[in-house]
């Protein structure tokens, strides 16, 4: 079975009742509750290919968790449809559960009062994983996530980093082709984050798992994702590879060239502006919306001038994403 994720026009509206302020308001709310509709996810379409890691990005409240809840079968969409490894998750929740693993960084799926290892054993029985297979897999997870020093500890006594590492292992014990990770590294220190990223990379590249990841950490996106989907106010605003997105929105580079001839006259190529001249050093930047990428600019500068040294200052992904949001908001 292929581990693809297909999402077509997926929407979810929440209806909540608002409380009116004051005693009279409360009374009125009782008699005639005021209902408001919130479109948490609205007409979202995207696909994740088998063995691909896709980062689902967006500000708080954008609809990321709601999307993941529909794909894990926890929530039913208001309209549209989704398929995960060929299964409609909210229609066949149990069948879907066999194909997926899920980690929600904010809460654990493990039994709070049990030692981790017992939680693993319960999951093994639920999914009917043969004992030998279970041991081999735990061994592999231990190697990558260093779990064994605390897997006899009760879950409630684990640190956040330890708990999420255990949650990751627990989610993958039944060897699912598709994995959903909702802010798995939130609140972790840098060292543990790096360990978790290494683990995820291994799961995608060596095990061929399909991963849908939400995160606010752009370093993580850069390390793990080739493609991102950006949502805002429940709507998809962007779907592309990191390269494409950089090309479209990442036009805030600077190139600093040291000229062999400090007196040389500078007439920059089209799309490139001369920002500063500091002795033998000249600094170029993009000129207008049709500016070349930093790589194209480098090539043109080297072709046009005799340079003895070059330095690039590229926009980081955080800047690029900010530019993408701003343009999406304006559109
Ligand atoms: N169970 C719910 N009832 C009402 N509103 C909800 C519920 N779950 C989420 N929402 C609203 O839907 C929007 C999207 O939420 P969520 O999917 O959690 O966003 P994200 O994960 O991107 O931060 C928010 O405005 C949130 O308040
Ligand atoms: Mg969320």
Image (spheres, rainbow, N blue to C red):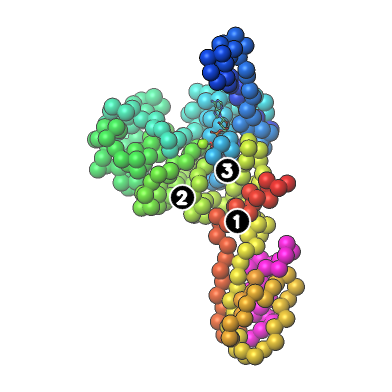
Q: Which residue is mark 1?
A: 320
Residue 60 part of the magenta segment: no
Magenta residues, as a range?
286-306
- Of labels 2 and 1, the one closer to you: 1
Q: Is residue 322 visible?
A: yes
Looking at the picture, does residue 260 appear above or below residue 30? below
Other residues around mark 3 within 10 Å, as few (<14) / some (14–19) / many (≥20): many
Q: Is residue 279 left or right of residue 266?
A: left
**Residue 201 bears which disc, if any?**
2
State yes or no: Cβ of the residue under disc 3 lies below 8 Å from any atom of ligand 1: yes
Of 308 and 133, nearer the camera is 308
The circle drawn on residue 177 is none
User: Going 73% across and 76% down the picture, which residue do you hit?
Assistant: 269
Helix, strand or loop under label 3 = loop
The quarter of the picture where residue 174 lies is top left
**Which mark, by number, is residue 58?**
3
Counting every numbered tag in the picture gives 3
Q: Is residue 289 on the magenta stretch?
A: yes
């Amino acid at each position: 079975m292929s581990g693809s994720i297909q999402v077509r026009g997926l929407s979810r509206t929440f209806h909540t009742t608002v409380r009116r302020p004051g005693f009279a308001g409360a009374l009125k709310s009782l008699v005639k509750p005021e209902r408001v509709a919130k479109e948490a996810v609205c007409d979202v379409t995207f696909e994740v290919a088998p063995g691909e890691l896709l980062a689902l990005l967006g500000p708080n409240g954008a609809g990321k968790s709601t999307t993941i809840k529909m794909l894990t079968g926890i929530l039913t969409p208001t309209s549209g449809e989704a398929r995960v490894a060929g299964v409609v998750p909210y229609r066949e929740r149990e069948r879907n559960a066999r194909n997926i693993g899920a980690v929600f960084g904010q809460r654990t799926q493990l039994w709070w009062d049990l030692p981790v290892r017992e939680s693993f054993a319960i999951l093994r029985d639920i999914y009917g994983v043969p004992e030998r297979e279970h041991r081999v897999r735990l061994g592999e997870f231990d190697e990558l996530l260093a779990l064994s020093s605390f897997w006899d500890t009760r879950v409630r006594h684990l640190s956040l980093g330890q708990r999420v590492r255990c949650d990751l292992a627990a989610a993958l014990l039944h060897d699912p082709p598709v994995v959903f990770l909702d802010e798995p590294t939130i609140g972790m220190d840098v060292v543990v984050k790096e360990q978790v990223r290494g683990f995820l990379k291994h799961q995608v590249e060596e095990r061929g798992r399909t991963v849908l990841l939400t995160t606010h950490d752009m370093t993580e996106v850069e390390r793990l994702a080739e493609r991102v989907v950006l949502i805002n106010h429940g709507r998809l605003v962007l779907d592309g590879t990191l390269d494409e997105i950089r090309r479209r929105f990442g036009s805030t580079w600077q190139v600093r060239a040291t000229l062999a001839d400090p007196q040389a006259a500078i007439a920059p190529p089209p799309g490139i502006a001369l920002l500063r001249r500091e002795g033998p050093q000249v600094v170029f930047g993009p000129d207008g919306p049709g500016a070349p990428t930093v790589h194209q600019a480098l090539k043109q500068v080297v072709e046009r001038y005799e340079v003895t040294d070059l330095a690039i200052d590229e926009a980081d992904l955080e800047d690029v994403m900010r530019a993408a949001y701003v343009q999406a908001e304006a559109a």
